[in-house]
């Protein structure tokens, strides 16, 4: 039985968790949503790193055997830091998975990325594409408004469609594939697909596959118990988190606790 730690700045990592649960229905999962400190995308790299280290310590104290950084901003800022801090367990981010999936999906090597301002500023995706194939042309759009709107309940904001439309309009027509470079965005995939008519890539599925490979390489025993469990911890408000997360997961969340690190 494996114990897997998954975290995000809030509810976005649930989109990754959903894919992890499909691949690992029988493991113990601990999810941490740092919603008191969201959005990470408006913070400095140093500050994001500090927050991620705290979450990492919490998960390791809870004896996880792998950490999934289910957040692009946190991956960009702290993947290497967490790998160095916790060398005994696999630490997996979402950006490499997103970039590889987009490369496989695109037919003209013109790829768009919508992400938080911090992810865009760190050039996380262009750097990752550069390693895959330097000929890929990447267009990035920082979407500062989306994460806070999704955290507080997408349907509660009247201008939500207009906001998405404005961001998507800035993506040039030659872009045939768009990466949802923030794990919050798959929650509003339907709205995004109204305005972007090419192919849309969500790194979540490939991240779960990466995780499986890493656990195998680290000889972590999986699939041995009868029933998986999932515990949720949040640093901020439980109610809003629970509502958005349950909607996306399509099931009730029983074990949810508030803990400020
Ligand atoms: N879900 C996060 C991401 O993938 C970040 C959202 C935020 O806190 O700004 O980048």
Image (tube, rainbow, N blue to C red):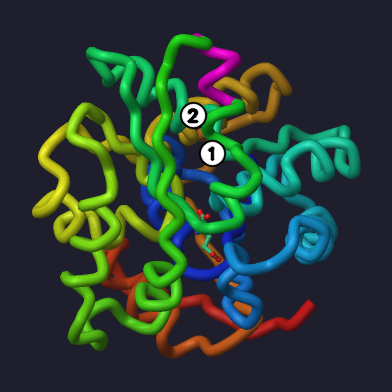
* In this picture, residue 160 sits left or right of residue 149: left
Element at badge 2? helix
The residue to which callout 2 is attached is: 97
User: Which picture quadrant has residue 61?
Assistant: bottom right
User: Which picture quadrant has residue 203?
Assistant: top left
State the quadrant of the N terminus. Answer: top right
Determine the residue positioned at 29% across, 64% down.
Answer: 248
Q: Position of residue 97 (x, y in %)?
A: 49, 29
Element at badge 1? loop
Label 1 crowd (10 A; few <14 / some 14-19 / many >=20): many
Distance from Cα at disc 2 to Cα at disc 1: 5 Å
The residue closer to the viewer here, 158 or 173, is 173
Q: Position of residue 22 (x, y in %)?
A: 36, 41
State the quadrant of the C terminus. Answer: bottom right
Determine the residue positioned at 36% across, 73% down.
Answer: 150
Label 2 crowd (10 A; few <14 / some 14-19 / many >=20): many
* In this picture, residue 94 sits left or right of residue 4: left
Determine the residue positioned at 46% across, 27% down.
Answer: 99
The residue to which callout 1 is attached is: 94
Residue range in magenta is 128-133
Badge 2 vs badge 1, beta-carbon distance below 8 Å: yes
Rendered view: 252 above or below 196: below
132 magenta-colored: yes
The residue closer to the viewer here, 222 or 215, is 215
The residue closer to the viewer here, 149 or 170, is 170
Residue 22 visible in image? no
Rendered view: 40 above or below 97: below
Dominant secondary structure of the residues highlighted in magenta in the image: helix
* In this picture, residue 115 sits left or right of residue 41: left
């Amino acid at each position: 039985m494996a114990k897997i730690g998954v975290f995000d700045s809030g509810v976005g990592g649930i989109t990754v968790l959903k894919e992890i649960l499909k691949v690992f229905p029988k493991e113990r999962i601990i999810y941490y949503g740092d919603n008191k400190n969201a959005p990470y995308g408006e913070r400095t790299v140093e500050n994001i790193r500090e927050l991620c280290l705290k979450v990492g310590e919490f998960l390791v104290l809870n004896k996880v055997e792998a950490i999934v950084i289910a957040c692009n901003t946190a991956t960009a800022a702290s993947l290497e830091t967490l790998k160095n801090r916790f060398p005994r367990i696999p630490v997996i981010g979402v950006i490499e998975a997103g970039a590889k999936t987009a490369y496989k999906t695109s037919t003209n090597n013109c790829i768009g990325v919508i992400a938080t301002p911090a992810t865009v500023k760190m050039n996380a995706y262009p750097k990752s594409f550069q390693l895959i194939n330097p000929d890929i042309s990447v267009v990035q759009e920082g979407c500062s408004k989306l994460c806070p709107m999704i955290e507080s309940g997408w349907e509660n904001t009247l201008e939500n469609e207009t906001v998405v439309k404005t961001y998507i309009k800035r993506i040039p027509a030659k872009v045939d594939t768009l990466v949802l470079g923030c794990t919050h965005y798959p929650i509003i995939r339907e709205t995004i697909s109204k305005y972007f008519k090419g192919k849309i890539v969500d790194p979540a599925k490939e991240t779960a596959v990466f995780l499986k490979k890493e656990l195998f390489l680290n000889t972590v025993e999986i699939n041995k118990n009868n029933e998986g469990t999932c515990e949720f911890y949040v640093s901020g408000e439980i109610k809003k988190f629970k509502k958005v997360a349950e909607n996306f997961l399509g099931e009730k969340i029983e074990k949810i606790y508030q803990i400020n690190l």
